[in-house]
Image (tube, grey):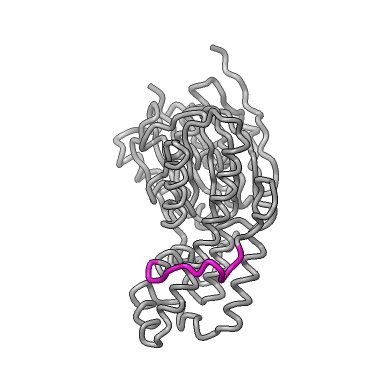
Amino acid sequence: MTLCLGIETSCDETALALVEDGRLIAERIATQVDAHSLFGGVVPELASREHLRVLAPLMDALLADSGRSLGEIDVVAVARGPGLLSSLLVGMSFAKGLALGAGADLVGVNHLWAHLLAPALEREIVFPALGLLVSGGHTQIYRIQSPLAFEVLGRTLDDAAGEAFDKAAKVLNLPYPGGRLIDELSQFGVPDKTLFPRPYVNNTNLDFSFSGVKTAIATYVAGNLHLRAGSMDSGLDGLLAELKGRGVLEELAVVCASFNWCIAEALRIKVERALDQSGGGVRSLVVAGGVAANSMIRSVMTELAAHRGLEVVLPSPGMCTDNGAMIALAGWYLYSAGYKHGMDLEAIPRGQKIPWDYCQMES
């Protein structure tokens, strides 16, 4: 039996979890949404300070929830990147201190790979799989041969899908994080498939680019300022009441649904192209990351998988967001295969390649 602690601090979620032999034992998460909503986006220094403030209390609560002690932990897994460097360093320092204090081994985890493995905590993933990672900072397609073998087939050349949703929400004056509200407002409208362009699909590659569609919605809203929400402070109910009161809910819903559709359609085209180019052998389609909670993307990918005779693997909404359970699971897979790190493990910020620099344990 191997008990693995997972630590996630790559952006604005502070999360810890315990996984034993691939099974989730307990988890704790602290969100910073309220703090960053004041600024309309994540403030790195504020995020790292908040990680530092809540990590120790979260750890105490996690151990109390699980009924386990620090000495029972066999391995400490920590998100080493990609992410905000200042936030990663807080989690890394905490992980190293715990590993030393508990006499446990240390494993650094690729945050992106962990997202794609997260659904395995809820159901079996059949390999080889095609993986679509859709998050605030990354949009990538992978061929996943096993829990330890990932090959990048396509990636974003500039802005990720999540950034496009954030930009759309900001120009519409929706509260941060606004991607969820765009999806919810979409439920009240039917997409106009001519309103926004499907971004970067008229090519033969598997890469993504969402900068153009960000510009497209900013330009559209600039010419239709009446669509902007009156206040960023109201929740969904307050927002709906305000939009209904001004008589713009239906019009805005069409805009949100159309934007939602063009993003989902761009993802579908590239995933289908990847399946065509994969040469066969793929048995399942895994969709993960924060934007994988989007209802239209989930629907489009479910339909695509069914059409291609593949199993679709979608994490529950709670597993889409950054969480400690996915880090613990990925760490458990690595450690079970004989991989670990020394105390010289380094954090890797966004934009840099994460090296395969594990130490191989003696069998």
The residue shown at (61%, 28%) is 342
Indicate whether residue 192 is drawn in magenta. yes
Residue 341: tell me if it is visible: yes
Front residue of this view, candidates 247 and 231:
247
Q: Tell me residue 106's x, y (percent).
A: 54, 30
Give the main secondary structure of the magenta stretch.
Answer: loop
Indicate whether residue 326 is drawn in magenta. no
Front residue of this view, candidates 312 and 203:
203
Front residue of this view, candidates 83 and 135:
135
Q: How many marks?
A: 0
Please give left or right for residue 120 compared with residue 150 in the image. Answer: left
Q: Residue furthest top?
A: 363
Please give left or right for residue 71 compared with residue 37 in the image. Answer: left
Choose top left, top right, bottom left or bottom right for residue 265.
Answer: bottom right
Q: Tell me residue 155's x, y (percent).
A: 65, 47
Front residue of this view, candidates 168 and 177:
168
The residue shown at (33%, 74%) is 237
Please give left or right for residue 271 compared with residue 57 in the image. Answer: right
Residue 99: tell me if it is visible: no
Residues in magenta? 187-197
